[in-house]
């Protein structure tokens, strides 16, 4: 046994050294992973800031070859597309989330849950193809509606999942208390369970909105793009993300610069939404903690 | 009177169930529509569609081998870079960082996931690709040039650029899932390892990585699924050339990028059908990959919860 | 007799909250020392200080001295990692590594130290599984997962794992609290036999257990060591009124 412990003593220094090396690697891995975020931010701010002027927010795109112009129609277009997606996606997604958390033990529910997981990770371009077949071809044309529906399909599973997770956090005794008072289940669910979690659910919804606002692939052949103002729900419509794509691969420097400007806006929007949601959640959590 | 009150409960339940059941129908619908629309192409080419690399819209002759190759190679590069980085980053977040640092560090990684794909593409074209062309690719050519992987002219855009962009995009996915797996591992395993005289790294290796291995695998597969289907950023930096080349510096084309590039300009119905069949293949592959990932992650979380 | 483990003026904190107040206590070699007291009295914290697991918790720290033979194990110069090979530990809930076989679990402490020779490992695994009275039950399924065993077997596996690195002291943190009475009896019997090999400090919430297995007993209350005496003495004629009230079940 003594020879064994001698042997152990012998390797001890080496093991400690290895441990420090691996811990350093772990820290390094985090730094390397985080680096692209700062690189992307730095370049977007550097190259995009100069493109943001009054025209950018108020004017239509300039015709090919002319400089100037703006992305006002694309900004409005993204807002409209996200609006359509929200009208369909939010009630639908929240309802599915409620179903999964309140009636989630049945076989049907586990099938639905599986589908939510599959839809969360479905390639967004596949959704675009589906909507092309489902809406664009029968309606004989690209349209704002088609784009909005495509985005809503991407919203539903994320909203359903976060809603389910949030509602599951509510302890069973809250439900039992309500039911025990003789309140019907639907009232307990809507007015006690859901209303009590309105805040976190809406933050989940806002995060989902911020995510689809930057989606490009499903819009390419549903909403297409447009150089003009919004012209009706059954007409093609411009969007910020598609415009960034088109400008990015264009040969004109002026357009490229506007692509950076658009990217800056998009990232700023996403960043502000994420940060404020986080701060908001943090604040409600701590205030709840103090009450208890 | 009582029954009147509670009757709405049933309506409410049926309403929710009806709304929820639309989701499986939607998934079946997506598969069905894609299958239906790609029938002309399936009839015309059969399995050759997957096995040939000739993609010729001018002569209406379509085979996607080159795109499958492009998708697989770019995703493989992405996994090779992202998997170790993500696992170690997750270890940083759960095992190494102090609680205060943990929150902001997690936020940074989550923000990586929030940046839209098209923005990564823009950055890829104008920042990453020139950087690869001027510095990285010549360097790799000089040091590792004896391997065919690192031979040939440096374009900047190409397989390597696509792989790197994809790796940045899947790091947050793999990290987030791996982090959940690590957090679900009971502390008692860490303490058991410590009590045996394990160093900090050995505790991580014995109690965290080994115990969570199934979940880690699931997370990596999930990241792979995301990489396979990613479109915009890849389209913008992969170079868009339908050919198979061994060199990672060479431009290529992925399944999703060819759809994005050609769909709005496709004129012949067979061309459109062929593009839809690519979509179908992509749908099936990602469906399979994601179900696989789900099994692993689910098993890992099960193991965590029973202890 | 000179104590093997001599704790002097040990205090421990979780952040601002003091969990142990100036504890001094000597543990004789080849004896069983039981630590009893109501929950939250610091008894687990006490033994977690002895193998320096206490300081792994964020914000936790300790002060004082503890001599294991000639070495002050609480001093900053001592590396807790190497100390833990001299002072092993068994936990409240059995925690064999779920991804390792029975064999690998027992051998894990040695493989960590770079001992890979199969013949050495075989010998150590067999010896310690026999010590833990588990050998006969598992000798035909050593490659099965450790988590496939019953709770009591798992706990004995953890004892074998802790013994395999050859510790001088074995700390046990309520090792039977998660087990059924039959498994508990087996472990108690085992502790009695292990005395020949190793010095044991056991935390228990069960006074009968302490009376059955220990040579000396320490009674902790709110972070203070109230009384430390030979077990028979402490249970029959306690010197402190608080001890008497506790063992007669009048509070706690």
Image (tube, helix red, strand yellow):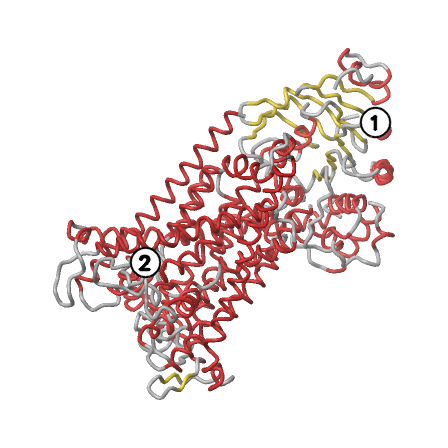
Instruction: Assign a secondary structure to mark 1.
Output: loop
Residue topped by disc 1: C215
Left or right: A255 in relation to C145: left
Q: Chain of mark 1?
A: C
Q: Position of residue C92 (x, y in %)?
A: 72, 37
Left or right: C90 in relation to C130: left
Residue topped by disc 2: B119
| Number of disc labels | 2
Let me know if marks 1 and 2 both belong to one chain.
Answer: no
Q: Position of residue B130 (x, y in %)?
A: 27, 66
Q: Position of residue A52 (x, y in %)?
A: 19, 51
Left or right: B135 in relation to C198: left
Between circles 1 and 2, the one closer to the viewer is 2
The answer to whether the residue labelled 1 contacts the one labelled 2, judged by CB atoms less than 8 Å apart, is no
Left or right: B27 in relation to A252: right
Q: Position of residue B101 (x, y in %)?
A: 44, 40
Residue C112 visible within the image:
yes
């Amino acid at each position: 046994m003594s020879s064994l412990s001698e042997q152990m003593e012998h390797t001890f220094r080496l093991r400690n050294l290895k441990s420090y090396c691996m811990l350093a690697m772990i820290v390094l891995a985090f730094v390397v992973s985080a680096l692209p975020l700062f690189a992307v931010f730095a370049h977007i701010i550097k190259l995009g800031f100069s493109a943001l002027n009054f025209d950018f927010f108020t004017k239509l795109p300039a015709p090919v070859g002319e400089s100037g112009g703006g992305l006002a129609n694309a900004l409005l277009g993204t807002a409209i597309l996200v609006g359509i997606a929200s009208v369909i996606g939010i009630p639908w997604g929240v309802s599915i989330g409620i179903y999964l958390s309140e009636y989630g033990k049945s076989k049907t529910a586990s099938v639905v849950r599986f589908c939510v997981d599959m839809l969360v990770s479905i390639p967004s371009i596949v959704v675009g193809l589906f909507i092309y077949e489902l809406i664009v071809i029968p309606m004989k044309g690209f349209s704002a509606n088609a784009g909005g529906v495509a985005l809503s399909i991407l919203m539903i599973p994320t909203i359903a999942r976060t809603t389910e997770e949030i509602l599951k956090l509510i302890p069973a005794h809250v439900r039992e208390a309500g039911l025990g008072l003789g309140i019907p289940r639907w009232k307990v669910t809507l007015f006690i369970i859901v209303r009590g979690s309105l805040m976190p659910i809406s933050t989940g919804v806002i995060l989902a909105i911020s995510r689809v606002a930057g989606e490009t692939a499903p819009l390419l052949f549903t909403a297409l793009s447009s150089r003009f103002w919004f012209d009706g729900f059954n007409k093609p419509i411009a969007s910020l993300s598609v415009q960034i794509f088109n400008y990015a691969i264009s040969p004109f420097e002026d357009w490229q610069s506007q692509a950076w400007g658009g990217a800056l806006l998009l990232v700023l929007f996403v960043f502000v939404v994420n940060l404020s949601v986080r701060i908001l959640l943090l604040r409600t959590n701590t205030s709840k903690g103090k009450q208890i | 009177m009582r029954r009147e009150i509670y009757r709405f409960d049933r309506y409410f339940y049926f309403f929710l169930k009806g709304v929820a059941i639309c989701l499986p129908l939607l998934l079946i619908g997506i598969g069905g529509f894609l299958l239906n629309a790609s029938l002309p192409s399936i009839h015309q080419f059969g399995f050759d569609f997957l096995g040939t690399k000739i993609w010729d819209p001018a002569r209406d002759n379509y085979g996607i081998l080159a795109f499958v190759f492009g998708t697989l190679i770019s995703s493989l590069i992405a996994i090779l870079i992202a998997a170790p980085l993500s696992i170690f980053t997750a270890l940083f977040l759960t095992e190494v960082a102090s609680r205060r640092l943990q929150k902001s560090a997690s936020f940074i990684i989550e923000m990586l996931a929030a940046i839209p794909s098209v923005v990564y593409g823009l950055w890829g074209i104008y920042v990453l690709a020139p950087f690869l062309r001027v510095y990285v690719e010549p360097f790799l050519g000089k040091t590792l040039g004896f391997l065919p992987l690192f031979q040939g002219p440096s374009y900047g855009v190409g397989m390597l650029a696509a792989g790197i962009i994809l790796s940045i995009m899947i790091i947050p996915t793999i990290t987030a899932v791996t982090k959940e797996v690590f957090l679900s591992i009971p502390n008692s395993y860490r303490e058991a390892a410590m009590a045996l005289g394990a160093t900090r790294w050995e505790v991580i290796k014995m109690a965290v990585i080994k115990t969570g291995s199934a979940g880690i695998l699931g997370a990596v597969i999930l990241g792979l699924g995301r990489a396979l289907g990613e479109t915009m950023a890849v389209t913008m930096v992969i170079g868009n050339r339908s050919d198979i080349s061994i060199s990672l510096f060479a431009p290529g084309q992925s399944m999703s990028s060819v759809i994005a590039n050609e769909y709005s300009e496709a004129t012949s119905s067979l061309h459109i059908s062929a593009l839809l069949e690519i979509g179908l293949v992509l749908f099936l592959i990602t469906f399979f990959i994601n179900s696989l990932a789900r099994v692993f992650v689910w098993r890992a979380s099960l193991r965590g919860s029973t202890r | 007799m000179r104590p093997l483990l001599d704790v002097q003026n040990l205090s421990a904190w979780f952040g601002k909250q003091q969990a142990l107040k100036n504890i001094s206590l000597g543990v004789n070699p080849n004896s069983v020392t039981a630590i009893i007291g109501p929950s939250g009295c610091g008894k687990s914290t006490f033994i977690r200080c002895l193998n320096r697991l206490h300081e792994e918790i964020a914000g936790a720290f300790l002060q004082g001295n503890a001599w294991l033979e000639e070495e002050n194990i609480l001093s900053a110069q001592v590396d807790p990692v190497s100390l833990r090979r001299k002072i092993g530990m068994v936990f409240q809930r059995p925690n064999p590594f779920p991804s390792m076989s029975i064999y690998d679990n027992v051998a894990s402490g040695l493989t960590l130290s770079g001992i890979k020779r199969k013949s050495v490992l075989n010998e150590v695994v067999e010896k310690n599984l026999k010590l833990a009275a588990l050998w006969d039950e598992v000798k035909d399924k050593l490659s099965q997962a450790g988590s496939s065993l019953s709770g009591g077997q798992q706990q004995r596996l953890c004892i074998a794992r802790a013994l395999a690195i050859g510790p001088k002291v074995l700390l046990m943190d309520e090792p039977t609290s998660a087990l059924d009475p039959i498994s508990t009896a087996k472990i108690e019997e085992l502790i009695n036999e292990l005395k020949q090999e190793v010095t044991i400090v056991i935390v228990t919430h069960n006074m009968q257990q302490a009376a059955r297995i220990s040579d000396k007993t320490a009674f902790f209350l709110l972070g203070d060591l109230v009384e430390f005496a030979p077990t028979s003495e402490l249970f029959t004629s306690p010197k402190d009124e608080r001890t008497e009230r506790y063992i007669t079940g009048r509070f706690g």
